[in-house]
Image (spheres, coloured by chain):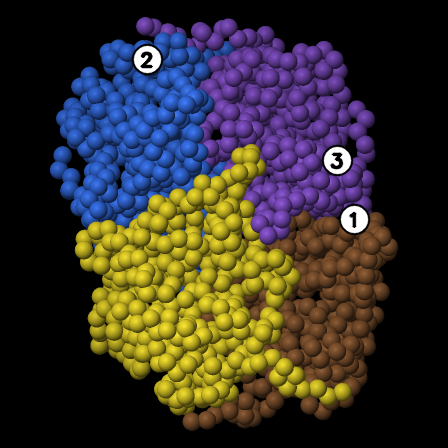
Chain colours: A yellow, B brown, C purple, D blue
Amino acid sequence: MQHNGEQDETERPRLGVGMIGYAFMGAAHSQGWRTVGRVFDLPLAPELTAICGRDGGAVRAAADRLGWSHAETDWRALLDRDDVQLVDICTPGDSHAEIAIAALEAGKHVLCEKPLANSVEEAEAMAEAAERAGERGQLAMVGFNYRRVPAMTLARRLIAEGRLGRIRHVRVVYLQDWLVDPEFPLTWRLEREHAGSGALGDLGAHIVDLAQYVAGEHIIGVSAMTETFVRERPLLAGASAGLAAGGGASGTAHGPVTVDDAAVFTARLASGALATFEATRFATGRKNALRLEVNGEKGSLAFDLERLNELSFHDDTEPAVSAGFRRILVTEADHPYLEGWWPPGHALGYEHTFAHQARDLVHAIATGTQPEPSFADGLRVQRVLAAVEESAAKNSSYTPIPALEV
Amino acid sequence: MQHNGEQDETERPRLGVGMIGYAFMGAAHSQGWRTVGRVFDLPLAPELTAICGRDGGAVRAAADRLGWSHAETDWRALLDRDDVQLVDICTPGDSHAEIAIAALEAGKHVLCEKPLANSVEEAEAMAEAAERAGERGQLAMVGFNYRRVPAMTLARRLIAEGRLGRIRHVRVVYLQDWLVDPEFPLTWRLEREHAGSGALGDLGAHIVDLAQYVAGEHIIGVSAMTETFVRERPLLAGASAGLAAGGGASGTAHGPVTVDDAAVFTARLASGALATFEATRFATGRKNALRLEVNGEKGSLAFDLERLNELSFHDDTEPAVSAGFRRILVTEADHPYLEGWWPPGHALGYEHTFAHQARDLVHAIATGTQPEPSFADGLRVQRVLAAVEESAAKNSSYTPIPALEV
Amino acid sequence: MQHNGEQDETERPRLGVGMIGYAFMGAAHSQGWRTVGRVFDLPLAPELTAICGRDGGAVRAAADRLGWSHAETDWRALLDRDDVQLVDICTPGDSHAEIAIAALEAGKHVLCEKPLANSVEEAEAMAEAAERAGERGQLAMVGFNYRRVPAMTLARRLIAEGRLGRIRHVRVVYLQDWLVDPEFPLTWRLEREHAGSGALGDLGAHIVDLAQYVAGEHIIGVSAMTETFVRERPLLAGASAGLAAGGGASGTAHGPVTVDDAAVFTARLASGALATFEATRFATGRKNALRLEVNGEKGSLAFDLERLNELSFHDDTEPAVSAGFRRILVTEADHPYLEGWWPPGHALGYEHTFAHQARDLVHAIATGTQPEPSFADGLRVQRVLAAVEESAAKNSSYTPIPALEV
Amino acid sequence: MQHNGEQDETERPRLGVGMIGYAFMGAAHSQGWRTVGRVFDLPLAPELTAICGRDGGAVRAAADRLGWSHAETDWRALLDRDDVQLVDICTPGDSHAEIAIAALEAGKHVLCEKPLANSVEEAEAMAEAAERAGERGQLAMVGFNYRRVPAMTLARRLIAEGRLGRIRHVRVVYLQDWLVDPEFPLTWRLEREHAGSGALGDLGAHIVDLAQYVAGEHIIGVSAMTETFVRERPLLAGASAGLAAGGGASGTAHGPVTVDDAAVFTARLASGALATFEATRFATGRKNALRLEVNGEKGSLAFDLERLNELSFHDDTEPAVSAGFRRILVTEADHPYLEGWWPPGHALGYEHTFAHQARDLVHAIATGTQPEPSFADGLRVQRVLAAVEESAAKNSSYTPIPALEV
C-alpha cells in the first residue's frame, strides 16, 4: 500500500506563511510553524512557504535548514507572493512598523515579534493600520509568546475565575546575565537606533505585557530608574548579530552603548494594586529568570520561566493548617495547550510557546476572530515602556499611562 | 528569486526511516525525526519515509498527522522497501524481537524502543542478531532516550571525568501515579503477555539503564520485592490502548492485572557501591518523577526528570564554607546537545531527547560506529529485570546478574 | 517593686531531672529542659537538677555551661538523689539497658535516647522493666525526637485523619556524609561494642521509628544489604569522642571499623504497602537529609529534615487542573507545638524537638499517661534493626519481624 | 559529689540585663539572653536581672515565664537599678527615643529594638546621645537581628571578600500576609502615633538595613510608592496588642488605619547599583518571606528567610558548564555563629538570631568596642524610611538620602 501523506492534507485549506528574518526568533518561529499541525488539530494547514533575508546565500541556507520552501531577499517581494497569506515578522524592532504596515496594506495577516515597535509613534501607526485592516478581515497579532506558556495561560484562567480575588500586588522580574562581561561586543541589541531600548524593550516588554495579561488589568502609571552599567563595548568584527553572537569583538575599537542595561520601576494598576518590575541583563547567574508573582485577597500565584512547566498557587480559602503554595505541574491533559502534547509529567520547553501561538493564530484566521495580543495590546505595552523612559528621565517622577484610544 | 529548500538537501545522502507503531512513542519519535535535521548539522538527511500500523485508516491518518510520506499496514512490507534504511520499532514489547531480528536480517539498521524485549531469551536472540548484523555494517540501538536528556549526558560526563571519585551510592526512583484509580482500565500495559512486566519493564528498565550509564558500571546483583496493589481492573471497551487511553472502561466486566504495579530493589554495583531502585505507578501526585542521585567520594549528583533542565552537583573538593549542591541549568552552549537549540536559560522539554537520539544514531550510521545503548546494553538491562523478578519470587534473596557474553 | 521570678514557680510541683551524658545529645536535651517551661504552659516545673559524667572536671564544666545545678560522677549516685524524679539517659547505646533498668528499679521515670539499646535482648529487658515500672506509675520514653518535628507530627495527624487513604508506598532515606573522608578517626560510633551498629542504629533507627509513626503501621518484614566502605580508620589520639570530634587522629595507627557505613533495605508494612529505607554516612554533600515520602490512595506527603519547617502535601481529591504538592510552612498557630513559639513564618530549628519531647513527657508524668514512643516502641524498632542485620547476613532474604508480645 | 553550677560562674564578671517590654520581641530577646551563655563562650555572664512593664500582674507573670529575676512597672526604676548594666528596649517605637536616651544618660549600655525610632528627629537625638555615651565607654546597638542569621553574616563575608565583585543589583522583598483579612483589628501597629509607619517601618526597616549591611554600601536615593489597601478596621476590644493578638475585634466600631499597608521603592546605591524594595503585609500566603538577592560582576547571592539555613551562591568565575546557584546549608562549624550549635545539617531557627546578637553585644561590652549596627546605622535606616515617605508624597520623585554627619 502506497500513500502520500502530504497530498491528503489538501482537504484543509492551506495557509501560506512568509517569514522575514531567520536569526534566533526566526528559528523559533520556524519550529512553531513546522510543529503546530503535527500536534494540534487545525482548521487550516500552515505551510512554510517563503523566508526572507537580505543575504541571498544565507537566506537560502536558512530556508534549507529551517524547512521553508522558498527564499526571498527583498521583503517587498515576499509581500507580493500570492501563496503567502500570513507575514511573520522576526526582524529587529526598527523595521517592524514599515514591514507590518506594508504587509497589512498588501492584504496579508501579520504576526509581528515583540516589542511591537521602537516608539509609541510607530506603534500607533501600526495599531491604526491593524484596525483598518481588521475592517477588511485581516488579522494582526504581536508575538508575546510567554502568554502561551501553559502555566501562564493557566494563571490567567485562575485569576479570571476569581481564584485570587482582588489583586493587591504584582511583582515581576526578568533577569538575564549575558552582558555582565564588559568585553561582550556591541551588537545591534545595544544600539538605540536598531533596538529602541535595551533590557527595557527586550525583557521589559515581555513582563509588562505578561503582567497585564495575567492580572487582567492595565498599568496606569509608573515611576522608573534605568541604568547603563557598561557604557562602551568592543565593536563587532563583522555585521551585527543577535543574542547568540558573542563570538567576535573586533579588537581594540569600542563604541558607545546607547541603550539601558537595566530598568527598574514601580507601578500602579487600575484596581489600585501595586506592582514592581525589573528588567536586566546584569543578573549574574540568572539565565532566563522571568519570575512573576501575584497576590490577591483570596490567593496568590508564582512562576519562574526557568521552571516553565510549574505554576505555584496558594489558595487562601483553605484552612491554614494544610494551606501552602502548591506546585502545579502544568502538564495535565486539561491544562492549556496540553491536549496536543505528551502524558502528564512530560515537560514542555521554550519553543512550544511558538507552536501555541501559531495554533491560536491559525484558529483566529480560520474563524475571522481578532487574536490576542492585538497590535492595540502591543501599543499599550509600548506606552508603558515610553512612560518608563520618561519617568527615568524626569527624576523618577510618577508618569501616568495614557488610556488607549486607537 | 525562487528557491526550493527541499531539493537543495540532495547534496547530503538521505536516510530513509520506516517506523512501526504510532501511539505515544510513535508520535514522540516522529517529532524527533522531523526536528533533528532542522536543529543539528547532520551528515545524512533523515527522511520520514514510511510508517506502519495494522489499521489502514488509522495509519494513514497518523502518516498525515505525523508527517510520514507513506503508510504501510504490514511491517514485513515496510522491511521490503528499498527506500527504508533504518527501521524504528515503536510497538509494544511483545513484538520487538520478531520485528527487530527480521529487520536486521533484511539489512536494515534498527532503532528499538525500550525495553529491548519481554524476556531475556528474546533479548539474547536480538543481541546475537545485532552482533551478526554489525559484522555486516548494520547498526542497532535501543531507545533509552533518557540517556540523552542533556542533564543526564552531562552527569555521565562529570562522572567519567572523575569529578565524583569512587561511587558509593546510587539511588533512583521512577514514580508515576496513573494507576492509583482502581477504575483505570486493563490496557495492554497491564497484561503480561503484551507488556512482559508492569512498572518494572516500563519504568524500571529506564532507571536500570540510566543508573548503569551515568555511574559507568554494572549492577552485579539485586534483592527485590514487587507488588500488584490492584489485582483486577475493568476491561477496556474496545481495543487495547496506550497510556493516554483511560477513556473507556467497559462497564462491569473485570479482568486480572498480570503485571506488577510496583517494584523496589536494592543492588550492588561492580565497584562495591550500594544502589536502591523503585519503579511504581502508584506514587500519588508524582507524574514523571525519575529521580537519580549518585554519591561519590569527591562529589554528588542529583536529578529529577520533572525538572529536566537542571542538574544538581555538589563538589566536595571545595571549602565547606561555600560548598553546596549547585543547580546547573543545563542550557549552556557547551552542554551536551545544546549547540543546536536556544540561548542559555531557554528550557528544553521531554521530546527533545528523541531528536538527540536521532542525531546520534544518524552520526553513527554515517560513520559506521556502534551507537549506545546497543542491543547488548539492552540485554544487560533485561537480565537485571529478570533477576529482579527472580529475587522477588525467591523471598527477596540476593540474585546475581550473569556477566554478559553474547 | 522587687520580685523574684524563681520563687513564684513554687506553686507548680517541680520535676527534678537528672541527666547522664553531656556530649551532643546532652547539650541538646539540656536546651530542651532549659527552654520548655519558658515557652509552654506546663503542669510541672522541670528543674535541671543534676548532670552525670565520669570525668569530674569535665562534668562540672558541663554543668556550668549547660545550666545544671549539680554534677555527679557516678550514675548510681544520680539515681540515689531524692531530688531527681526523671532520669534522662544520653550515653552511648551500650550503657542504656543497665542504666535505664536501674533507674526504673530506683523508682524514677526514664527518658532514654535512641536507639533504645544495642540488641534486641537488651531492648526486651528494658521494655519488660518499663512495663513493670508502669504498673507502679513510672513512665519510660524513648528519645525519637524527630516524631516531634512539627511537620512530622502534622504528617501523622493528616494520615490519621485519612487524608492519604490507604498507604501504598513509604520511602525514607537518612543521608549524612561525615565518614566520606577515610581519615576520619575511629570514634566509639564506629565500634560495634559501643554503638551496636553504624548508620543502621544511628540513622536507621530514626527512620524506622519515624516511618512506622507517620504511617501508623508496623513493618512486618525486611530485605537488606549493608556495607562498610572504609574498613580501617586511624585510631583516635585520646579518649573516644562523639560526632563533632574528628579533631584528632593519632597518626599512623589504624583499627578496624566494626559497624556498617550504610544500610539499604526494602520492607513490607502491615497494610501491604511497600517501603524502602536507606541509612548512610557516605552521601557526600548531604548533611542531615532525612527525607520521608508517603504515597496513599488519596494523597501524598513529603518531608526533608534539611528544611524541617516545611511539609509537602498533595491532595489527590482536588481537580487535577489545580492540584500539586503544596509546601505547608509548619509555623501556624494551630500546627503541632506552635502554640508556644513565634508568629507564622518564623522558623524553628533542630533543637526545638527536644523542648517538644520534654513538653509531652512532662504532661505525661503529670497525668500518669504512658507517653509515646514507649520502650515497647523502641523494642519494635530494635527488632526491625535486628532483622535488617539478619537479612543482610543471609543473602538479603526476606526476614519477618516478630510481632510484639512484651 | 555535690556541685552548684550557678556559683561557679562567679569567675566571669556578670552583666545585668534589664529588659523593657515583654510581648513578641521581649519573649524573643529573653530566649536569646537565656541561651547565649549556654552555647557560646562569653567573657561576661549575662544575667536576666529585671524585666519591666506597666501592668504589675502581667509583668510578674512574664518574669516567671521568661526567666527574669525581678519585675518592675516603671522603666525609670529599672534604669535606677545598680544591678542592671544593659537596658534592652523591646517596646513599640514611640517610646524608644525617650527610654534609650534616658538609659544612656543613666550610664547604661543600650540595646534598642528596630526600628530605632519613629522619626528622623528622634533617631538623630538617639544617635547623638549614643555618641556622647560612647565617649564615656557606653555602647548602644540596634536590634536588626537579621544581620545575624548565619546565612546573612556569611553573605556579608562573601561580598566583603570580593566574591561578587562590583555590585550591580540588589533586590529585596519582605512579604507577610497578616493584614489580608479586612476584619483583622486595628492594633497599635496600624496606628501612626505608636508605630510611626506600617509595613515600611516594621518590614522595610529590616530590609533597608539588611541590604546596606550585606552589600556593604549605602542607599543614596529612593523613588517610592506606598499604599493603604484597607483604610478602616475594627477597633480592638481591649488594650492595644501586638502581632499575635488578632484575638478580638470589638464588634461594629471601626477606626482609620493611619499607616501604610505596603511600600515599594527603587533605589540607587553609592556604587551605582540599582536596588528594588518591597515591604508588605498583603502578600497572601507569604508568612515571613524576606528574600534578598545581590548580583555582582563575579557572582550572585540569594536568600529567603523562610529557608533561613540556606544561602544560594553563584560563582561566575567557574566554567559555565558546571556553574550554578549552589545551596549552601549554613550549618558548618566554620560558618558564622555555628561554633556553638549543632553538627552540620542541624537547622537553626528564627530565635537563634537573638542569641547571636546577645553574643556579639556581650563581647563588645567586654572589649569596649562599638557593636554594629550602631545607633548611627539605625539613623541611616531612618533617613531612608523618611525619604521613602517623602518620595511617595511627592509623586514618587527621586529623593536623595542625606549623608550622615552625626
Image quarter for residue B19?
bottom right
Task: Say what secondary structure mark 2 lies in.
Answer: loop
Q: CA distance from mark 2 to mark 1?
A: 65 Å
Is C63 on the left or on the right of A169, as rendered?
Answer: right
Q: Are marks 1 and 3 in contact (CB under 8 Å)?
A: no
Q: Residue at x 62, y 27 (%)?
A: C143
| Mark 3 closeness class: few <14, some 14–19, many ≥20 residues within 10 Å | many
The residue marked by circle 3 belongs to what chain?
A: C
Is D26 on the left or on the right of B50, as rendered?
Answer: left
Q: Residue at x 79, y 57 (%)?
A: B249
In the rendered view, tell whether residue D118 sits above or below residue D392.
above
Q: Which residue is mark 2?
A: D54
Quadrant containing the C terminus of chain C is top right
The residue marked by circle 1 belongs to what chain?
A: B
Q: CA distance from mark 1 to mark 3?
A: 18 Å
| Mark 1 closeness class: few <14, some 14–19, many ≥20 residues within 10 Å | some
Q: CA distance from mark 2 to mark 3?
A: 55 Å
Instruction: Name the amino acid, label 2.
Output: Arg
Q: Which residue is mark 3?
A: C218
* Residue C253 visible in the current orientation: no
- Residue C96, horizontal then vertical, whole percent: 66, 25
Residue B229: mark in rendering: 1
- Residue C47, horizontal then vertical, whole percent: 52, 14
Task: Say what secondary structure mark 1 lies in.
Answer: loop
* Residue B395 visible in the current orientation: yes
Q: Are marks 2 and 3 in contact (CB under 8 Å)?
A: no
Instruction: Name the amino acid, label 1.
Output: Phe
